[in-house]
Amino acid sequence: MKKLVFILLLFVFTGTLLAEDGSQLWLRLSGGKNADVSCNLNNATTEIAIKELKEHWYGNTPVQLVFSKAKELTRLGEGSFVIRRSSGSDPVRIEASTKQGLLYGAYHLLRLQQMGQAEGEMDVVETPRYQLRVLNHWDNLDRSVERGYAGKSLWEWESLPGKISPRYEAYARANASIGINGTVVNNVNASPQILSASYLEKVKVLADIFRPYGIKTYLSINFSTPAELGGLSTSDPTDKAVQRWWKDKVKEIYQLIPDFGGFLVKANSEGLPGPQDFGRTHADGANMLADALKPYKGIVMWRAFVYNPGDEDRANQAYQEFMPFDGQFRDNVIIQVKNGPVDFQPREPFSPLFGAMKKTPVMAEFQITQEYLGFSNHMAYLAPMWKECLDSDTYQQGKGSTVAKVTDGSIYNQKITAIAGVTNIGTDINWCGHHLAQANWYAFGRLAWNYKLTSEAIAREWINQTFGSTTNNPTNTAGSFSSFRDALTEMLLESREAVVEYMMPLGLHHLFAWGHHYGPEPWCDIPGARPDWMPSYYHKADSKGIGFDRSSTGSNAAAQYHSPLSEEFGNLSTCPENLILWFHHVPWDYKMKNGKTLWEELCYTYDRGVQKARSFQKIWDQQEKTIDTERFLEIQNKLKIQMRDAVWWKDACLLYFQEFSGMPIPVDIERPVHNLDVMKKFRLDIGNHENALEKDLFMK
Ligand code: GCV
């Protein structure tokens, strides 16, 4: 009997040790040795740094946190730090000229420890490339999350300000550990209610929790708030009463949240109100808010995501609308521009606004949540996609004027530099819906800090911390961790391209189903719906060919880019093939560089994407003994869904486009397993997309 109890207890105990639900993210730091940590500055932020090091630093030497206004440190700028140790037996010295720098230094030391790089001599100098590294939550006040696939909103508005979820602090800690220093807590499709006194009390509680972690709180605002909430007869930005209203509101906010960051604004976009409703301009609207925020050092992040149905190519519109206002915005306004000119598609060229606005600060907006990349069902590691944008040469100030450099202040004298990511976070126990999607939250933070890091280096860091052993809590029961890390790194690095290949290769875009952005519906045609929301607007398939002519014979979007890109993109023979259907309507029998016809290339590329999805499953199945069972099985299940969807995408697109090309699917690729007529009847219950796929889509 005693033996049985012992075995049971052992089982429960080891079971608990081995339980991994993903809730600890990349911070699976174990209880430490009560390290010897000292600090010459005492405040809530340094207390956190001390606590983290005391609990998780395993090195045998003490750690000294040193706040210093030494020239070298102040020159490096806010958030920067150095970590130095002359030999393995000396104390580690983390020095910074700001409290945030000390906190980031502490997290960096722990990261180095987990990478096995915190031994011996150390000489690390770290400085963030962007001043503001901001998450955007598209969270609504009813706790639904627009384009969120990981449960409900973290913010429990109904029980705030009274009840405080432990997740608020866990969220702040995770962000601080990767250098994120701002969060916009509500959706850009903003409710005026967020500025009501009762909501501001709730926001204050969040801001108080985030502050010690170096995170500023921002709010998305609805441009009509003065009328909708304030009861004014207008929200016209030139109206004195409206200006007064915003000034008073801003004052009220700063009384509650003294370090409030400012406003994020989506105006005159997708039906939202804005200054144009009153015959005013984006500059009028942004400047009015900027004036109200200025005395408190607040800023306005004004979005350039604007487009209207009509004759003009959607891809051209943001540039046309914003370029005339270059130089007319106040110095506390920054224009927030999505990475591509349309809308977070699996592959887009960079937005031509980057670098073109020379007298106005511009910041990139990336989407961490996978609205167009398989929700939280598909593995799509997005660091390569973001780097593709950041590393793109705009040529605006000669060769080497990359998107990164025209936004980080190194080419233009920007007073504010920033970068934003639309989060993939929700109430799911693993935060992101898919364990591997945590890598995207992590990667956004790390790239915002230093976009020079390689996607591979970031992946390896993330894997080490997320799956590797913690010192006293080994989770690796068998097998070799380094071969696991190599395998998962390879999967992650290939994953985004695989998604592009099985969804929308060669520059195809927006082939999504009506009502959701998950599955394919290139045939979608809803009578009376906005044409620019229909896939045929983008693919333009006909008996001659496929693709959007954005050359001089078409919408001429290519001309919005600086030479030599305008010529390169605008000319079919020089356009990069991975964007060829973005810029050109290409004949089906057009000869690609490898000698295949366009149609064949399309078929082979879709097939390659499917093969990659299958190879991910095979690689993953070999990892069973290396990591904990829970995460192994959960990821295995997601990869199965991804594989199934990849086939669905390939079959739907190839069978549909074949109706136009009239050409055979090459014999050496996988035959379609679905029938086009049946696929056209698939309907997705989007509220429950994972099960709906089984139930509604594939059992019909
Ligand atoms: C928040 C796309 C998305 C919308 C989103 C919008 C935007 O259109 O589908 O959900 O709205 O972009 O970025 O404002």
Image (cartoon, rainbow, N blue to C red):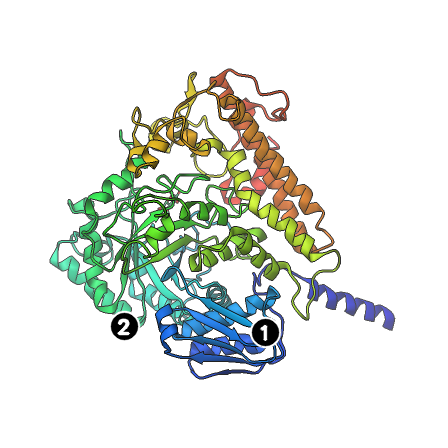
Q: Can you name the residue that lies furthest to the left here?
A: 240
Camera-near label (1 vs 2) is 1
Q: Which residue is mark 2?
A: 255
Q: Between residue 240 and residue 27, name the one nearer to us.
A: 27
Q: Where, quadrant-wise, is the C terminus in this rendering?
A: top right
Distance of label 1 from label 2 (alpha carbons) = 37 Å
Residue 5 place in picture, x, y as percent: 82, 70
Q: Nearer the viewer, residue 385 or 689?
A: 385
Question: Is residue 208 shown above or below 158?
Answer: below
What percent of the width, then of the height, locates residue 530?
Answer: 33, 32
Asked whether 238 or 322 is in front, the reply is 322
Q: Position of residue 636 (x, y in %)?
A: 65, 46
Residue at 57 percent of width and 59 percent of height: 461
Q: Which label is found at residue 56? A: 1
Numbered disc total: 2
Q: Amino acid at mark 2?
A: Gln
Q: Is residue 194 above or below residue 369?
A: below
Question: With 240 as the anchor, is 615 left or right in this view?
Answer: right
Q: Earlier in the sequence, mark 1 or mark 2?
A: 1
- Residue 345's quadrant in the figure? top left
Residue 39's label in the rendered image is none
Q: Residue at x 67, y 50 (%)?
A: 633
